[in-house]
Amino acid sequence: MAKIKSTMKRVGRVFILLVLAVSYTFSVPPDVEIPFLKLSFLNLKEDLEEAKEEGKFLFLMFHQEACPFCDKMYRVTFQDPKVKEYFTQHFYMVLIDIKGANPVVDFDGKEMTEKEFAHKHRVRATPVFLFVDHQGKKILKLVGYIPPQDWLLVGRYIVEGHYKNKKFFRFLREERRKLRSG
């Protein structure tokens, strides 16, 4: 009996993974590769633990079908070679469909749909990026398209720990000034 339950559990996980893979296929354009995109069962607690074990940060990209600014992130920002390299080294990204019905296990272990999870985080438009620390606490939430050079600064803000003592937009302004002057 225990063996049957174990087999059923495995079959169920494979089925869920297949459904999620199909969902991701329709979320990200098929001709685009995003190496830091994590294929996830949407158990954010487990994803966070895995990221932490690998010395990476986790961030969520809230998206929806036919979102032009999501598409621009996929095709422009996420295709920049420096972005690919830096974010693959330091981050995992999990996609959350703001209209989705797939179950999500939140960082605190509560289960809800993607749509409910997006609503909980006050996401109405897309894309929205939610970066969390290794305990699942929000570090930074950004809305809209972000060009590659600014996206790299977002990454540095998180990885280098600037979020612990400086507001993001102050960091961004100071770093842009440094880049312009020299």
Image: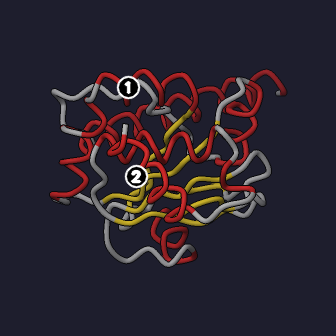
Q: Position of residue 178 (x, y in %)?
A: 43, 45
Front in this rendered view, residue 33 or 155:
155
Q: Quadrant of the N terminus?
A: top right
Q: Position of residue 122 (x, y in %)?
A: 50, 78
Label 1: which residue?
A: 84
Front in this rendered view, residue 87 or 152:
152
Front in this rendered view, residue 27 or 74:
74
Quadrant for residue 76, please give it.
top left
Does 99 sit above or below residue 19?
A: below
Callout 1: few (<14), some (14-19), or many (20+) C-alpha neighbours within 10 Å?
some
Q: Secondary structure at mark 1?
A: helix
Q: Quadrant of the C terminus?
A: top left
Quadrant for residue 55, please give it.
top right
Callout 2: few (<14), some (14-19), or many (20+) C-alpha neighbours within 10 Å?
few
Q: Which mark is residue 40?
A: none
Say which of marks 1 and 2 sits in front. 2
Q: Position of residue 114 (x, y in %)?
A: 48, 62
- The answer to whether mark 1 and mark 2 are in CB contact below 8 A is no
Q: For the point 67% across and 32% down, which residue is it?
A: 51
Q: Which mark is residue 177?
A: 2
Q: For the point 31% across and 53% down, which residue is it?
A: 146
Does 138 sit above or below residue 179?
A: below
Furthest toward the right, the residue is: 2
Q: For the point 53% across and 58% down, which residue is it?
A: 130
The Cα–Cα distance between marks 1 and 2, rounded to whole angstroms, is 24 Å
Mark 2: which amino acid?
Arg
